[in-house]
Image (cartoon, helix red, strand yellow):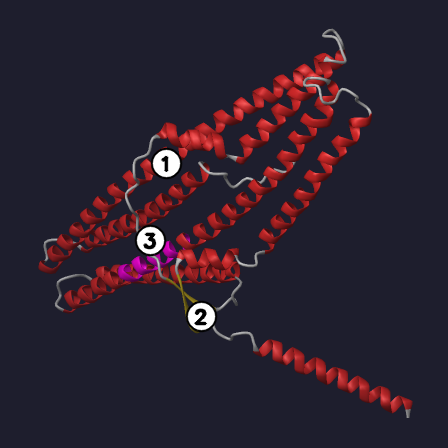
Amino acid sequence: MKKDISLILLLLTLLISFVITTTAESSIIDSMEFQGDRIDLTLEKAIEIVLKDNPTIKQSELSLEQAEVKSKQIISAGKDNKKLYSNYKREGTIGNLLVYKLPKLNADFVLANAKRNYEATVENLKADIEKSYFELLQLEQMNEINKEDLDIAKDIYKKTKQKFELGLVTKQEVISSELNLKKAENSYIASENMLKKAKMAFNIKLGYDVMTKVNLIDELGYKEFEGVSIADVVSKALINRNEIKAAEFKYELEKINMDITAKQYTENTYVYRDQKIKLEKALKDLNDIKKNIEMEVRSNYLNIKEKYEEIKAGEKAVELAKEALRLYQLSYDVGTAILTDVQEAQTSLLQARLGLSKAILEYNLAISKFEDSIGVGRTVINM
């Protein structure tokens, strides 16, 4: 009897396992086409979705809470030294430095750094989804460009076959135009696949199912970058950047440690000289970081200007390539141009359009990077 019950339980377990497995498998979409109701997304909406209930942000918020507790603990620990230093209220004494100045400096930095780290975490997540959004837009544009190039190749192939039937071109030209068509088809298929892969990755970042049908509302356009005072934006960066705040704290910390050391040791001792070197190094590190931040901001500014000029040049290149293809197609139709001329013009137009699309993407990302570089930045400081 016991064996019969055990057998029944085993069969039930296997049946339940089979049902669960079958249900899970049936939920997997047996298609490479995106499914469900279309979700329209602006960049702003995409950022909002990524930031909502984000584990990375929650971790940063938790770190902020911990920093508030730690800040209070540091102040409390400093006050415990009152018993050791009867003159702690007198400015400049070791007691004053250990009871008030050093704990306050540490406590203030711990809390302020946690707040800046939270901001940097948010900015990093926003920058990441913004990059993915723009890159996906560019891939959509590239796919459209390849589709239009395929249409051009089809038209050339059709005309070449008609010319062959009239005895105006050789079989070799027909084969050449057919090969050109096949290459265009392959490029279009490759761009389609690349776009699908990017959409799947984008869906995962947003927390959607892999094959969710998402439609990006914004366009991969550009607006002229408004002129700024480079001195003003560098000044903002030197005030705001997380890396500089950390270096300033380190320098102020070593200054206080130098004051404490100077009251306990003479200049010819190892301890005094070691602390003096630490102070000098902290000052050098601070100055170096400021210079590097300034160079970063200036470089980002130059990148925007450079990418903008590339866009302007790219627009002219597309305009010129379009006209060249149009003229070669007309000439080919009347027999004053050869197939190779038309194909080369077609290739030039494709390259010009893809180059312009890439320049617009890089311009938008350059602006985003520049704007981040004058704020708190994207770097989290752990000390």
Label 1 – label 3 distance at C-alpha: 18 Å
Please give the residue where the numbered disc 2 appears in the rendered image: 34
Please give the residue where the numbered disc 3 appears in the rendered image: 220
Q: Nearer the viewer, residue 130 or 250?
A: 250
| Residue name at image x 19 percent, y 49 percent | 319
Task: Report the disc number at residue 303.
Answer: 1
Residue 133 in the figure: left or right of residue 69: left
Residue 204 in the figure: left or right of residue 252: left
Q: Nearer the viewer, residue 92 or 312?
A: 92
Kind of residue at disc 2: Phe
Establish if 192 lies above or below 291: below
Q: Which badge, 1 or 2, comes first in the chain's sequence?
A: 2
Kind of residue at disc 3: Leu
Measured as percent of width and height from the top left, residue 133 is found at 42, 55
Measured as percent of width and height from the top left, residue 334 is found at 8, 59
- Quick one: label 1, few (<14), some, or many (20+) residues within 10 Å? some
For the residue labelled by badge 2, is the local secondary structure a helix, a strand or a loop?
A: loop
Q: Is residue 174 magenta?
A: no
